[in-house]
Amino acid sequence: EFEHRLMLAVLRLGGEAYSGPLVLELEERTGREVSQSSVFIVLQRLEKKGLLSSRMEPGGQGGRVRRYFRLTPEGMASLRDSRRDLVALWDGITAQLDES
């Protein structure tokens, strides 16, 4: 689930992002605290799976080098498949949730 949310955050931030803005995006969208180290660990795992790619870029005005991540075509396909599956699972149960 966290991998999925992180991939969506990468996509939401224009397809390229580094860990700092991703943490802020996840916290803002989910209302939950997210540690930067957990985000970076999952980013690396997603890259090993071939769902993200990364590049190093120097920070502005002598800032730190940053690793920017972006979705690969495989990552986009994974999100599309996940969305399709979740929509199919949600179909017809919204009313049941609203009753509770």
Image (spheres, rainbow, N blue to C red):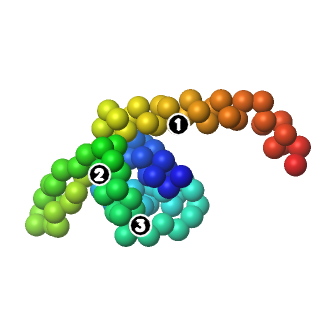
**Residue at label 1?**
82
Q: CA distance from mark 1 to mark 3?
A: 22 Å
Q: Residue furthest front?
A: 49
Label number found at residue 48: 2
Counting residues from the start of the chain, the first of labels 1 and 3 encountered is 3
- The quadrant in which residue 66 appears is bottom left
Q: Nearer the viewer, residue 42 or 25?
A: 42
Residue 24, located in which quarter of the rendered image? bottom left
Q: Secondary structure at mark 2?
A: helix
Front tag of 2 and 3: 2
Give the amino acid type for the residue marked by disc 2 in the picture. Answer: Lys
Which badge, 2 or 3, is on the more N-terminal residue?
3
Q: CA distance from mark 1 to mark 2?
A: 19 Å
Above or below residue 100? Residue 19 is below
Which residue is rendered at x = 45% and y = 44% of the image? 8
Determine whether, in the image, residue 78 is placed left or right of residue 96. left
Q: Secondary structure at mark 3?
A: helix
Q: Secondary structure at mark 1?
A: helix
Residue pointed to by mark 3: 38
Marks 1/3 in contact by CB < 8 Å: the verdict is no
Distance CA(mark 2)–CA(mark 3): 15 Å
Residue at the image point whose x is 23% and y is 49% from the top: 54
Residue 13 in sight here: no
Where does residue 46 sit, x and y in percent of width and height?
Answer: 35, 51
User: Is tag 1's residue or tag 2's residue first in the polypeptide sequence?
Assistant: 2
Q: In the image, which is nearer the foreground, mark 1 or mark 2? A: 2
Q: Position of residue 80 (x, y in %)?
A: 47, 31
